[in-house]
Each structure stands twice: as C-alpha cells, then as structure tokens.
Amino acid sequence: MDILSPVKRLVLYGVVCCVAVDSSTVLGDDRFAGSDQYIQAAMEKWRVPGLAIAVVKDGKLVLARGYGVCELGKNRNVTEDTAFPIASCAKSITAACVAMLVEEGKARWDDPVVKHLPGFELSDTYLTTHITLRDLLCHRTGLQRCDLMFDGANSGTSEILRRLKYLPLAAEFRTTLTYSNPMNVVLCEVVASVSGQP
C-alpha cells in the first residue's frame, strides 16, 4: 500500500474544501440573485406600489433595497431608508420588547402599569391602580376601542396619555377582549421608561 495515497487524498480533500469555501465567499454577493425579479413580480401580482426590504444576518445588514414608489402618481421612489407605517404589527414588536424586559428581570407581566408610569390615569381609580402589563397585552382592560384618539397632528404620545382618563368602558374589567390601540401606546411608554430607550 502506498503511504502517499492517503496523504494525497487528504491534501486533495483539503484543497477541494478550501476552493468550495472560497467560491461560496466569492458567490456571496450573488446569494440574492433573482430576488429583484421575484420582488417586482410579486409587487405586480399583489398591486403593491412600493416596498423596502432589509435582510439582517448575525446582527449585520447584508441587504437593503427599495422598490417602486411611495405613492401612486408621485415620483418619490422608495429607498432602503423609506419609513413605512406598520400598523398593528407594532403590537407584536411591543410585546416582544415587554417580554425581553420580563426576561431581564426589569418588569413582570403582572406589574401594574402605574409602577412604571406613575402618571398613568384612567377614568376609574380601580382600573388605574390595577391594570397590568398583561391586561394591556391581552386587550382585557374593558376600555372602548377609541381609534379616533389618533387624530393626526393632535395625537402625540403625551396627548394620547392625557386623553386616557376620558375613555369610557365598553365591558367589565378582565371579562372580554376589547381591542385597544391606545393601550399599545401605553405599553410603548412602559418599555421606554423601563429600558431607558425610546
């Protein structure tokens, strides 16, 4: 048996592996090849005027692109920096932020809101002192939906928080789901207060 044969095979295997690793690194820029055509076809199919996409891997931005326009009939193109309202998708992000604070021991699900926001005030004193982070996340406060609190220029966070004390009840506390956008604003303020970050 030729002793060089296994050594030659090992060296050859090592070279092949190095070439494979090197070629994947070189081809790394091509890993999104075809994505532009795919996204543009999907935009046409779903009649989406514009969108932005970002891909993050291992904490690093590896792709950011904009497609289409911000508004039909306008020439303002979407870029990778275009901000989009994400509507109620923000609720899942807010819930994840609260969960992170709970995991870090900085908050508890059943903490009263007033523990973290001393100025929090509702029309009912009992609710003010007993509503918890869990109640807000589960939409079981009993408060009316009140989407009209968000009225454009006058709907800044401080104004929404001020108006909370005027919200009427639609149901008994913790008896049914009463969807509430203003309570998500409260949760965002709790996250900001506890984390020290906006």
Image: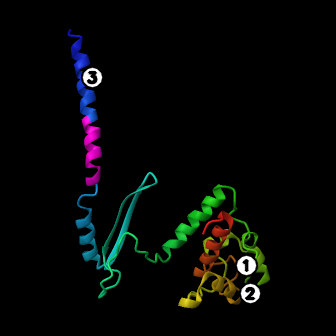
**Residue designated by label 2:** 123
Viewer-proximal residue among 21 and 144? 21
Which residues make up the magenta segment? 19-30
Report the predominant secondary structure element of the magenta stretch: helix
Residue 92 seen anywhere in this rendered image of the structure: yes
Q: CA distance from mark 3 to mark 2?
A: 77 Å
The quadrant the C terminus occupies is bottom right
Residue type beneath disc 3: Leu
Residue at 25% in and 65% down:
36
At mark 2, the secondary structure is: loop
Residue 151 seen anywhere in this rendered image of the structure: no
| Residue 25 on the magenta span | yes
Residue at 28% in and 40% down:
22
Residue at 58% in and 67% down:
95
**Residue designated by label 1:** 120
Question: Dot 1: few (<14), some (14–19), or many (≥20) neighbours within 10 Å?
Answer: some
Q: CA distance from mark 3 to mark 1?
A: 69 Å
